[in-house]
């Protein structure tokens, strides 16, 4: 076991949250973005999809609002098969090609590798690494490290399952106005435009959005919009 892996395992075990854990992984290796996704399982009564990612907030919001999950070849492969895979193995559909081109505009790489893990209760997790390296360079980098990342899977899965269960019982309660302001913000409307549409003052709109951001426990408005979409609040 390498020193890098040992150091990473020690730190992700101690991490307080899945988001912290995947950031630790990313800091210790050379890829650009990291995601952990608990895939839908009918046996688990979780109301909202659980995803933690280091992708830019703007890309996450765009992905969710455009419902790219239904055409994402990575998610489709993970749902249909239980084996880890390199993204270069995927034959994307025309819709998926459009998604990948859009991702590139947000600074997301075209190279990646996804690890699929299923625990003893049948819950499946998807751990994905994304890189801006050219394909050949990426394959040469990732192939010797596959065992490292697979070793991390049970720890990341356990953290994600624990957090998802807690979140399903602790969804934030937003008012109608807070939801309306968030929805319009997600459509790219400015504070002044939202004020006109809802017949409110701009100061009131800013207050509603600030309250929504606080309730959703987010630092930025973009994060709040993405979280609200992910939790199906808007």
Image (cartoon, rainbow, N blue to C red):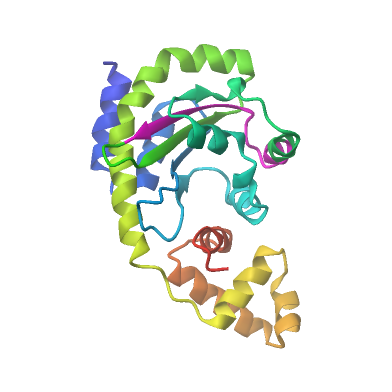
Q: In this view, does 124 lie to the left or right of 75?
A: left
- Residues in magenta? 101-118
In the orientation shown, which residue stands out farthest toward the front?
Answer: 43
> With 196 as the anchor, is 70 left or right in this view?
left
The question of residue 103 being in magenta is answered with: yes
Q: Residue 140 in the image: x percent, y percent?
A: 53, 11
Instruction: Give the residue drawn at x 61%, y 34%.
Output: 73
In this picture, is 127 found above or below 2? Answer: below
Q: Is residue 70 or residue 55 the one in the foreground?
A: 70
Q: Tell me if residue 65 comes above or below residue 74 in the rendering.
A: below
The N terminus: image quadrant: top left
Residue at 35 percent across and 51 percent down: it is: 43
Q: Which residue is drawn at 70% across and 84% down?
A: 198
Residue 220 is a magenta residue: no
Q: Where is residue 61 in the image (x, y as percent from the top left)?
A: 61, 54
Horizontally, is 175 left or right of 188 in the view? left
Question: Is residue 152 among what the camera can see?
Answer: yes
């Amino acid at each position: 076991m390498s020193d890098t892996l040992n150091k990473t395992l020690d730190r992700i075990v101690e991490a307080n949250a899945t988001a912290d854990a995947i950031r630790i992984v990313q800091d210790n290796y050379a890829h650009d973005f990291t995601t952990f996704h608990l895939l839908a399982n009918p046996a688990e009564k979780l109301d909202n999809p659980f995803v933690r990612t280091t992708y830019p907030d703007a890309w996450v919001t765009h992905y969710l609002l455009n419902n790219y999950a239904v055409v994402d070849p990575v998610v489709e492969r993970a749902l249909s098969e239980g084996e880890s895979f390199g993204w270069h193995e995927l034959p994307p559909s025309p819709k998926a090609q459009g998604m990948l081109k859009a991702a590139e505009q947000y600074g997301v790489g075209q190279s990646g590798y996804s690890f699929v893990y299923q625990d003893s209760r049948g819950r499946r997790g998807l751990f994905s690494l994304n890189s801006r390296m050219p394909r050949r360079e990426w394959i040469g980098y990732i192939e010797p490290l596959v065992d490292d990342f697979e070793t991390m899977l049970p720890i990341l899965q356990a953290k994600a399952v624990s957090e998802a269960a807690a979140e399903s019982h602790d969804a934030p309660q937003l008012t109608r106005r807070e939801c309306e302001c968030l929805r319009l913000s997600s459509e790219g409307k400015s504070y002044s435009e939202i004020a006109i549409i809802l017949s409110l003052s701009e100061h009131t709109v800013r207050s509603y959005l600030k309250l929504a951001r606080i309730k959703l426990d987010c630092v930025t408005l973009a994060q709040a919009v993405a979280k609200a979409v992910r939790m199906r609040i808007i």
